[in-house]
Structures are given as C-alpha cells and as structure tokens.
Amino acid sequence: METLFVALALILAGGIAGLCLARQFTFMKLVTIATTSVGCGIGLVFTLPRLLSGVAVPAVSYRWLHIFTLSFRVDSISLFFLLPIFLISPLALLYSFHYLGNREKKIRAGANYFFFAVLVAAMALVVMAADMITFLLAWEIMSLSSFFLVIYDYQKKATRQAGYLYFIFAQGGALFLFAACALIYSYSASFTFTGFVAIPDLVKLSAFLLVLCGCGSKAGVLPLHIWLPYAHPAAPSHVSAVMSGVMIKMGIYGIVRFYLALAPTSAVFGQITIVLGALSGILGVVYALGQHDIKRLLAYHSVENIGIILLGLGVGMLGVATGNKTMAAFGFAGGLLHVFNHSLFKSLLFMGAGALIQQTGTAMIDRLGGLLKKMPLTGSCFLVGSISISGMPPFNGFISEFLIYYGAFYGLSLPGISFIFSALVIISLAIIGGLAAACFSKVMGIVFLGEPRDASLSAASEAGGSMILTQFVLAGACLIIGVWPDYLVRAAFQASRAIPLIAEFEVAQFMPLMVNISRTAALFLFLLIMVTGFRKLLYAGKDCPQTGTWGCGFTQPTVRMQYTGTSYADSILDFFQPFVWIRKKYAGIGKIFPGSISYDTHAEDVFANGLSLIACSITSLLGRLHWIQHGNIQLYIAYIVMTIIVLLAFF
Amino acid sequence: MINLNDALLALTVLSVLFGLGSNRLMSLVKIMACQGVVVSLIPFFRDYHHEINVGALIFLLVMLLIKGVLIPGFMYIAVKKVKIQREIEPIIGYHASLFMGLIFILVSVFIAEKLHLSLPRDKVLLMITATTTLAAGLFLIMSRRKAITQVIGYLMMENGIYLVGTALAHGAHTQFVVEFGVLLDLLVGVMIMGIILHNINSSYDDVDTALLGQLKD
C-alpha cells in the first residue's frame, strides 16, 4: 500500500513541478512528464502482479481533522481500475509534449499539468477508498480538477459554457452520491463499504438508484450524458483522452463498488442496469452518427461504450441474482474488460482527433478529407482505433463484447422474464456494433479518404513525434490484446472474483475458448499480411496510374461532388426519427437555373433539448425574482440581517 | 470602581448615539477613535482590578494601539488622501437614526433580560451596551451610502462583539486570543479598504457605493 502512496506522491510532485517551473517551458514539460510517468510506472509495477496473482493488499487508515477516518483498501476490482489510470495518464502526458506546443501559453500549460496530476491522483484515491467519506472526498477532488482541465481555453465563450455545464453535472451527481451515502449510513451506521448487508431491500434499491444517478452523471449514462458532447470538444485532446478514457470509468467503478457493498439479491438491479445500458448504447451511437464535430462524435461514442459496459455489468448482476455462475462471471468480466479496452481505444481516437485538429485547425468532419495521404501514421492509428471501437476482430473491442455476448447467451435459458433481458442485451449489442461500424466508416471515409474538401488542408502534415509515438503504443496495445487476450481476460476474471458468487467460478475450463480466439485472430492477421505482401509483390515493377478519388471519369471533377458525412448518416438517422430531431434548413430548388442554395442540418439530442426546456422554464420563473437583486449593498446587508433575525427568532 | 465601569459603559453608548447622529465624516472617525479607546479599557477595569499581570497589560496596550490609534489613523489618512466629500450622505436621516439608536437600546435591554444568561448584575449592563453597539454598527452599514462609512459601521459592530466577549468571559483572557485574531483581520480589512477606496476613487471619481451598483449583472 505504501508503494501506491509513493507513486501518488511522485505524480503530485510532477504536477507541482509543472506549476513551479512553468517559465522554462520545455524543461518544465520534460520534468513533469518524466516524474509523473515514473510515478505511474511504480503504480503499474505494484498493480499488475497483484492483479494476476490475486494477492490481498492490507488496508490502511488515517485520521483526518480528528473526526474522519480516511481508510484505503485495494481489492481485485480496485486493482483492475488502477490499471487504465496508471497506463493511460502517462501516455496522455507524453502526447501533450508536442500537443501543448504554444510557448505563449506556458503558465497555463503549467497549471494544466498541475490539475492533470491532481486528477490522476484523485482518480487513484477514488478507486482505493475503503469508506464513503474517503470516496466522496476523492470524488470531489476528481470533479474539480477535471473542471479546471476542461476550461483550459477559458477565453472562448463556448469553452466556459461547456465547463459550466460539466460543473453542474459533476456537482449535481455528487449530490446524488451524498444522498445515497446518507441513506445507507442512516440504516447501517457505518461508513465502510462492507457493512451494508443488513439494509432492507427497498432501501437498497433506492440507494442503488441514487448511485446510478450520481455515478451515471459522471459516466455519461443516457439521460445524464449531456455534459459529454460539450466538455470533450472544449477540453484539450490529451485531457479529453483521459477524461473519456479513464475518468468517466470512475462512474462505472462507483456503480460496481456500491453494488458489491449492497450485495443485493433481487434481479431488478440487473434489469435496470441492462435497460439503462441498452438505452445509452443504442442512442449514444445514433447521436454520434448525426454529429459534425469529430470530438463531439467521439464523446457520444463514450456514451455508447458506457452503455456496453453497463450491459455487461447488467448481465453479471442478473447472473448473480439468478445464481448462474457462468453468466455472472462472463458479464462482469466482459464489462470490466471493456472498461480497460475502451480506455485504450477511446484515448487513441481522441489523440488522433487532437492531431487532426492541431494540423488542420478545424474539427468539422465535412470540411476535412483526404488526410490519409497527408498524415498516414495518424490515419492508420485512427483506423485501428475505429475497428477496435466497432468491436471487430482481431482488435480488443471484440474480446470484451464477445465475453458479454457469451454471458448473455447463457442467460437465454433463464426462467421467468430474465431471459427477455438477456435477449435485449444480445439485440442491443448487435445494433450498437453495426451502428458503430457505420459511424466509423463515415469518419474514416470522410476525414481520411477522398480528396481534401478545403484548400487550407494542403498545409496539414504529420503531427509531432510524441503524439505519433503514443498513438502507436495504444494502437499496438489494441492489437496485442485482440490477438493474445489470455492475460487480460484472466485479469478481468480475477477482478470480478471480488463478487462472492464468482469467486467459486472455475475460469480454467473456459480458457480454451480464448486460445481459439487467439488462434483465429493470429490466422486472420497472418493471412492479411500475406495477401498484402502478395499484392505488393505482384504489382512491383508495374506502373499503376493514379487519379483523384471520386473522379469517376469526369474531366473536371470538383471536391464538392464527394459524399458528405451528413448524407452518409441520413438514412440511418431517419430510422431513429423520434429520438433524433433533425433540423433541416433547405429551401429546395425552384428555378430551372438555380442560384446559390444552402442545405444545413443539425441532429439534435432529445434529452439535451428536454433538459434545456426545463432549465429555461426554471430560469424564466426565477427571472421574476430579479427585482430582489438591485445592486444596492446596503439592502443586501439588510437582507442578511433580516435572515439572521428570523433564524434567531425561530430556532 | 463600579462607578468608573458604568461611566465607561455610558461613554460607549453615548459614542454610539453620537456616531449615529453625526453628519461629518471626520467627526465620525474621531468618535470611533474615542469609542475604540473606551471599549478596550472596559475589560481592564472589569476583570483585572484584582490581579494585573504582564500579559494582560500588554494585551491592553496592543488593543489600545490598534483600536484607538492604528485603525482610526488609517481611516483618517483615507479620508484625507482620497478627498472624500465630508458629508456622510445618509439613506436614513440623522434624527431617524438617533431614534433607531434609542430603539436599539430598548431592544437590547429586552434581549438581555430575555436571554437568561445568569450573568452577575453588573454584567447585564455590559451586555446591553454590547448589543446596542452591535446593532448600531449593523444599522450604520445599512443606512449610510459611502463605502468608508460601511467600514466604520463594521468597526462599531466589531466593538460590540468584543464587548459581548468581555461580558461572557469570566476573567479568562484566553478568549481574547480569538478576539485578537478578529482584530488583526479587521486591521488588514481597513488597510485593504484604503487601497480599494483609492482605486474606486480613481476609476469612478467618487466613492459612493450606489455607483458600485453598476457592477451587478
């Protein structure tokens, strides 16, 4: 345990160094990245062997302010969640070496590194917390530090608004968590995460619902996902990589931790989780399809992947409730593994998007094009990320989704209505996978293939070395896990052993399954390399004429003839009509020789619109009270005095 | 001795009423200086008349220095430097303020009876004085327009709080340590006020707080 604290201290020291040395820009970046990476490295060295061997780590506790006890404990689930924290954070920092290249913003970059280090340490503490006080404390630090990371470009109005929105959701979610903890404490009289078993069932359910609201607003579960598509585009890319890749998983961790502590027996918990997961998964990817901004699109994909994770956890909970060991183990292991996998490919995709935005100066998908020729390395890494997130072999997304499918198919034989939920999981996973593939074929096709849609794109070139390196590391990790999944699958099963029912589950009998997947993936990869090599060999020495993409035999093709992302996604969005409001501005063609015509669409999020409707009505209601605020200091003080007198008189 | 005590309390109440009724800024600052001196003398004549030790003496001197000399001195400089118009500009008129002061005394008597603090007889008077000073300070903050009068009101309120502390402490001067911290805060506050007033003056050409109302959104 002390090793972990040393690691956290090193990470924080790196952040403070970033703040202090901000005047020497390059030196500061080097020192910060090196120190923080060493800290994360120590953390990884501590975490990995214990996760694989399942050795227990002794708990520690400290007194704080003479009243509170801060206690820490690391069990297998905590270890599993520590893995992405310590792996992704140093990579994102390394990425930022070239990403934050503007010398004029060096003070701001220093502050950014400081809050980044605080965020990493706070996330680790959230995972290590053994009681609710520690958990909530670390949770708040995490929310606040990430808020400061989001408002990096605080001069822009959109960024400030996004930061504000995130702040509201983070603190609102924290309020729900406080309510949940208070409810639990009022029945169990204990703050530790162990003594909740004696609570009545109904209270357990309401506490779990509160936790779902609180952690869900952090994780981006569907009705509460609204901050994600605003905060991620506003934040710098290495920050959105960590926030989307790692931080929103803390919401998932919270759900798992409270589920473990509540140890419910009813199947309702699993059913609720599955319904929420299916909703977030399907609608998340549908909304992603309608986006024009690449980082907003990726943000909606985070919602989708949180949905997949919730589906996995739901299958696991259903398995626990019905006593089906295999289903429980595969559900939880699949969900947890997807947490790790998503942290890999989502941060990879955000880093790719960051490189694109840095080089082209725009995030609008329909203004990019043909970038694979300008940025081949970034492009191929982005392709790897795209295939992984679509859940296709031989990459890592497939493995975790496969585990969830496997668990869900076991659930089809369940009695009662539970099998309906298993079927729901299978159907929604299939829909999600298909739509995600459609969405990423849109991104890859429009952004990287074809011809540049804008003259300014000709200046784009490959991004800086550290940015490429980190993307390659992540892409390599995606491939390696996809082809040799044994270790990670074993780790995920080991992690889910914290659930009593799964502890009795024998993993070994299912390991041949993994070997088969591994062999098939390797075979596929081998064939792919062979075919490509063969093609190269055949065409070697022959002269292949190359013409512009979408030329189609025209003598004067223009780049505006190309397919756009909007038209590609249009038919799919039409299908999901009641959930996506598409606002079109199009006058139609009236004359035989039409003049200039504009066509403009916006796919709008029903939930965001609903929320803004509620918010607007509340503000207009409160606006009636605006006369109270008149700017007269004397009267303000009179209000305060009046309040004090009333309070003194009544209490 | 008891007579001297009561005389000091009467002086305090008088200074409060005087402060509420005065229409010149400079005279208000002078009144506050007097009140500071009187207020810091009260605990000395009340609690330490049987044993005067070095700590208490030092404490008394520092109190006198801050309340009677430093803070009024700063305010004096602020009034001179910033060239504030010497008129106080009340929101509630002087006569009405004086009348309010009398009401405060009445209410304070009522409260001191009502609180049942089981104080010794001589301390009830102290409690009444303290509450009056506190309320008058708050009233001064609310009813005067200039920024500097608000600081003076706050100072008066602080004097009241100090007296409450004196009434409740039974000879132990550990409680004054907290009081002392508050006083240091106040000192810093007055200094900051001087700087801010200077800046407000240079950007608005006046230190009327009504102009600060333009800052609201």
Image (cartoon, grey):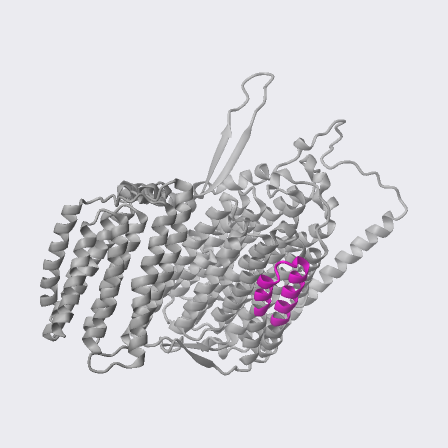
- Among all residues in the image, which is located at the extreme top? A592
Q: Identify whether A192 is placed above or below A416.
A: below
In the image, residue A28 lies in the stretch drawn in magenta: yes
Residue closer to the observer: A318 or A634: A634
Residue A394 rendering spot, x and y as whole percentages: 67, 60
In the image, residue A222 lies in the stretch drawn in magenta: no
Residue A50 rendering spot, x and y as whole percentages: 58, 79
Looking at the image, residue A309 sits to the left or right of residue A195; the answer is: right
Q: Count every numbered label the image shows and give the total.
A: 0
Image quarter (top left, top right, bottom left or bottom right) of the C terminus of chain B = top left
Secondary structure character of the magenta stretch overall: helix
Residue closer to the observer: B32 or A295: B32
Q: Identify whether A197 is placed above or below B78.
A: below
Q: Which residues are magenta?
A: A13-39
Residue closer to the observer: A410 or A504: A504
At 55% from the left edge and 82% from the top edge, which residue is drawn? A55
At 86% from the left edge and 47% from the top edge, which residue is drawn? A539
